[in-house]
Amino acid sequence: MLDYIVKSTVYDGMVRAYAASTTYTIEEARKRQDTWATATAALGRTLTITGLMGAMLKGEDTLTVKVEGNGPLGAIIADGNAKGNVRGYVIQPHVDFPLNEQGKLDVRRAVGEEGTLSIVKDLGLKEYFTGQVPIVSGEISEDFTYYFANSEQIPSAVGAGVLVNPDHSVLAAGGFIIQLLPGADEEIVTKLEKQVETFPQISTLIREGNHPEQILQKLFGEEPVHIHERLPIHFQCKCSKERIENAIKGLGKEEIKEMIEQDHGAEATCHFCNEVYHLTETELESLLKDLS
Ligand code: ZN
């Protein structure tokens, strides 16, 4: 079954709970970016949470996430939208460390323990929401939990995990975001805090074959979970030859002339999906014509 996000509410609508399976999405990102295991986990957790946050948007809204730590990854950049499309990359994909003391991929070491997590939401009509918080953990999920509490003032529990096979392909990936909505009373807060403490590892639940619906039910135990929507999620890039041509036009006539005379063509690679675009001399000449 392909990846999808489940949107639900719990506790009579006082709590919003989203869960996602993202194994195929993260494997696609890994193949495109050639990430090594620890980098795959860091990118995968970020992409999963970006996908879940995208699912909270409406219509044509989009969001961009930047995790800029002082670790060897450099930075993680991801974006997503309300339609379940995500894409993203890390500056240095060839990062891999031995497992940490808990036997898990050492994401903190790859990301770094200092830096910033910033989010920009493009809400259309030139309306932007931006939030930035310091990195508090480097494990990604905790950093987003901190972001929601401090930048959006929404008490949240965030979890995302990626398990990698010995051949570096993705074995299991997924995540959840649980948020207290306005009006939630103290009793619910206490119950939820207890449940969050005993949550099983999300990546283990996915590996065991649980669907997002089953994950939500496991997280909340006896409590009824009201499912509102299922949204497919996949790795999808917005790049196209036309966009690349426009970017080249932006470089100006002189630059394009040089490409024609010296290189007899041009090649450009999309950071997000690693697609390579080739432009022939003739194509560059027609760009020049457009500019004159
Ligand atoms: Zn692309």
Image: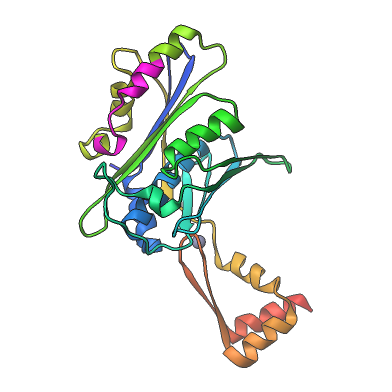
Q: Nearer the viewer, residue 165 or 103?
A: 103
Residue at image point 34% right, 13% down: 223
Residue 214 to residue 126: above or below: above
Q: Quadrant of residue 20?
A: top left
Residue 40 to residue 262: above or below: above
Q: Nearer the viewer, residue 3 or 68?
A: 68
34 relative to 1 in the view: left or right? right
**Residue 179 appears anywhere in the view:** yes
* Quarter occupied by the C terminus: bottom right
Q: Nearer the viewer, residue 113 or 42?
A: 113
* Structure colour scheme: rainbow
82 relative to 6 in the view: left or right? right
Q: Is most of the magenta stretch helix, strand or loop?
A: helix
215 relative to 143 in the view: left or right? left
Residue 123 drawn at (x, y percent)? 66, 39
Q: What stretch of residues is rendered in magenta?
A: 192-204
Residue 47 drawn at (x, y percent)? 44, 46
Residue closest to the far bottom? 261
Residue 274 drawn at (x, y percent)? 45, 66
* Quarter occupied by the N terminus: top left
Q: Quadrant of residue 203?
A: top left
Give yes or no for residue 196 being in the magenta stretch: yes
Give yes or no for residue 46 being in the magenta stretch: no
Tally of numbered discs:
0
Residue at image point 44% right, 36% down: 142
**Residue 11 appears anywhere in the view:** no
Residue 238 drawn at (x, y percent)? 54, 56
